[in-house]
Image (spheres, rainbow, N blue to C red):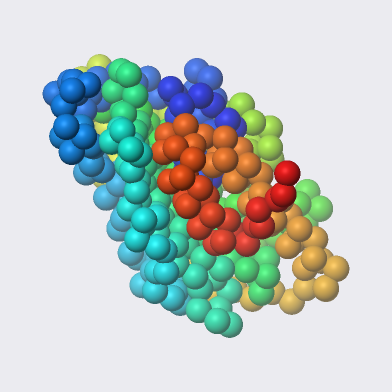
Amino acid sequence: MLRPATSLSVAAPTLPTISRLGRGAAPPLRGRRSGTTVRARMPLEQQQVTLPSLAHREVARALAAEAAAAVPLLPSAVPVDVADFRNSAGTAVGTLDVRRGEPASSIDFMLHSSLHCKVPNGAIDITSVLIFLNALTDAPHFLMEFIQGSPTSMVVILDLLPRKDLALHPEYLQKYYEHTHLDKQREKIEELPQTRPYRSPSLFVRSACSPTAVSVTIDCGQGGEGTLEEIVCGHLASAVKEVLQIWLHSCARDTSEMEEAEREIMIKRDQAVRSKSIEVDLTANLPRMFGPDVSGHIIAEIRKAFGVQLQEA
């Protein structure tokens, strides 16, 4: 969800993601061809792409289903034209589901999105699951994002986003990050020979993440399609499940006693992160992919979920 702006040729959301991939940081777009070359005079119906089935998308779907079964969520109220959308050229397609938390729960919303976009030398696929908490608790939010730019490589972002300054609140660091042993999941992924650290070029993005965040590029090299799928379905799926379980046990049902002034600071921090995410990720990039009308509907729905009002020019 948090990422710095880039050109469409190298990336596109979380639906909260397009900008996470900085220049030179995206997985190389090699070989992820979308089948037969589309000719300009072909009917539009034949040109339109569909959301492909990918290992990382299945991992995200299973995670979202597990989270939905464990926390109190209301049914999805996303409009049909936002739940499934595409651009007029048929080169980009996406899905978006937003479910609010039930009244009196600490869950604000869960957002699950997938994007598939054809680019000149292949395609890029982005899948995100975000679960944000409300002001009844100061526990961290849950963030997971997969960005696949080729059949053999992808970027993985997995974190519990802190809602307090960790240097000023060492007890918060201990409660949610040290005592839960979150760093073990990062170590398990980073010790794989196919991974290397992913560094966002955005200082804001880096400042919003925790010190235990999984932020890596997995590159299995030429001919490594099977290896990537094994990693995604094995090591990565295991780490994702474990981090979710930690979040469900330590954060999802947590309520916090806070002074009113402290709560206001936390709310202000949350709003800053959400507003910056929309500004950097969505308004700068979605119109390039889906055009102003379609992207306007999508951004409006995400603003509604985030509780961020449209600022007048």
Q: Is 186 situated left or right of 229 in this image?
A: right
Point out the image quarter for the C terminus.
top right
- For residue 136, which quarter of the picture? bottom right
Asked if residue 160 is positioned above or below residue 232 in the image, the reply reads: below
Number of numbered callouts drawn: 0
User: Which residue is drawn at the image coordinates 33% and 43% (left, top)?
Assistant: 86
- Give 102 or 230, whichever is nearer the viewer: 102
Q: Where is residue 240 in the image (x, y as percent from the top left)?
A: 40, 51
User: Which residue is drawn at the image coordinates 46% and 58% (left, top)?
Assistant: 111
- For residue 4, which quarter of the picture? top right
User: Which residue is drawn at the image coordinates 64% and 31% (left, top)?
Assistant: 202
Asked if residue 256 is positioned above or below residue 283 in the image, the reply reads: below
Q: Where is residue 232 in the image (x, y as percent from the top left)?
A: 30, 41
Specify the farthest residue to the bottom: 104
Regarding residue 205, the answer to whether it shows in the image is yes
Q: Where is residue 140 in the image (x, y as percent from the top left)?
A: 61, 59
Asked if residue 182 is positioned above or below residue 150 in the image, the reply reads: below
Regarding residue 243, the answer to whether it shows in the image is no
User: Which residue is drawn at the image coordinates 53% and 20% (left, top)?
Assistant: 23
Q: Where is residue 133 in the image (x, y as percent from the top left)?
A: 59, 66
- Give 12 or 228, whichever is nearer the viewer: 12
Q: Is 183 situated left or right of 218 in this image?
A: right
- Give 264 or 301, whichever is nearer the viewer: 301
Q: Is 228 situated left or right of 141 in this image?
A: left
Specify the farthest residue to the right: 261
